[in-house]
Image (cartoon, rainbow, N blue to C red):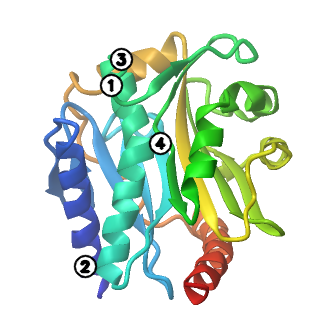
Amino acid sequence: MDPEQRLAVIQRGVVREMARYGREFTVDGAVVRGPGSTAVAVRDHPGPDGGHVDLGFVLTLGSAEAPVLWDCTAGLGTTEEEKLDSAVRMWAGTTAAAVVEFLEREGRHGDHLRLPALPGWQAVQGPATVFGFQSARLSTWLGGRELMAELAPALAPELTDPRLNGVKLFLGGRAGDEVAEVRVNGTVAQAASQALGSLDWPRGERFCWARLFVLLAADRPGLAAVRAAETEPPLPLAYPPAHDPAAAGTMARRREAIGRWWRTRRAGQ
């Protein structure tokens, strides 16, 4: 697939998945516009695995100062299109769910968390997506833990944006070949990743992973930015960058590692 075809598949997926949340998004050049000043921007990462893409939930389209909640997502499938569709669904079920829940605040798409170790912040955690072999064990473990409360002390120094911070957790693999990674605003948080890796989540003989996303909003500026997003009109359009060389280098290293796990998983099937 050429870049235009890949972008079209990704954007159609975003429109489809956001419609499941009752939100009308439409393609407009490099972004997908939503209600008010919201949008979703795309940074594509074509490569051997074919299913990696960065999606950024924009709260104030046209503002260079407003936060963009970027998340790297990847999908599985037998074709490039299937992998991209899977990646968008993965993002929608975790990251987009957390953002939509913060917009609605009705408890339908995520959990509102109390984190005493992070005073002044309100948190919403989207659903966890668990995939791979024997996923019920990892799902059960996640359902019985207050994971963010356990990681909050290590996360506190990593909250670099005074308004909004997006926290992604990715964990799994198999015994002896596992990954535990926490990213804050797209950057690996080493202490939090180590804390996640030290927890007793089940390690089996076959590959299984989980990912989840948490949105942390400061009591005043963060909540104001989220709540106004779907009611205020967008500013004159200034698209977020379609390619960030520094971010691309970091993502490429992570994709190489995840690709190795997936190739090993497929070889074992």
Q: Nearer the viewer, mark 2 or mark 3?
A: 3
Name the residue tied to disc 1.
108
As helix, strand or loop, the secondary structure at mark 1 comes to loop
Query: Residue 178, image x and y in percent?
Result: 76, 64
Say whether disc 4 or disc 2 marks the residue closer to the N-terminus: 2
How far, Cα to Cα, is label 2 from label 1?
35 Å
Query: Residue 189, image x and y in percent?
Result: 75, 46
How far, Cα to Cα, is label 1 from label 3?
8 Å
Residue 239 in sight in this render: no
At label 1, which amino acid type do we have?
Answer: Arg
Name the residue tied to disc 4.
69
At label 4, which amino acid type do we have?
Answer: Leu
How far, Cα to Cα, is label 2 from label 3?
36 Å
Name the residue tied to disc 2.
4
Say whether disc 2 or disc 1 marks the residue closer to the N-terminus: 2
Name the residue tied to disc 3.
105
Given residues 256 and 185, the one toward you in this image is: 256
Q: Nearer the viewer, mark 4 or mark 3?
A: 3
Q: Residue at the location (29% across, 78% down)? A: 81
Q: Nearer the viewer, mark 1 or mark 4?
A: 1
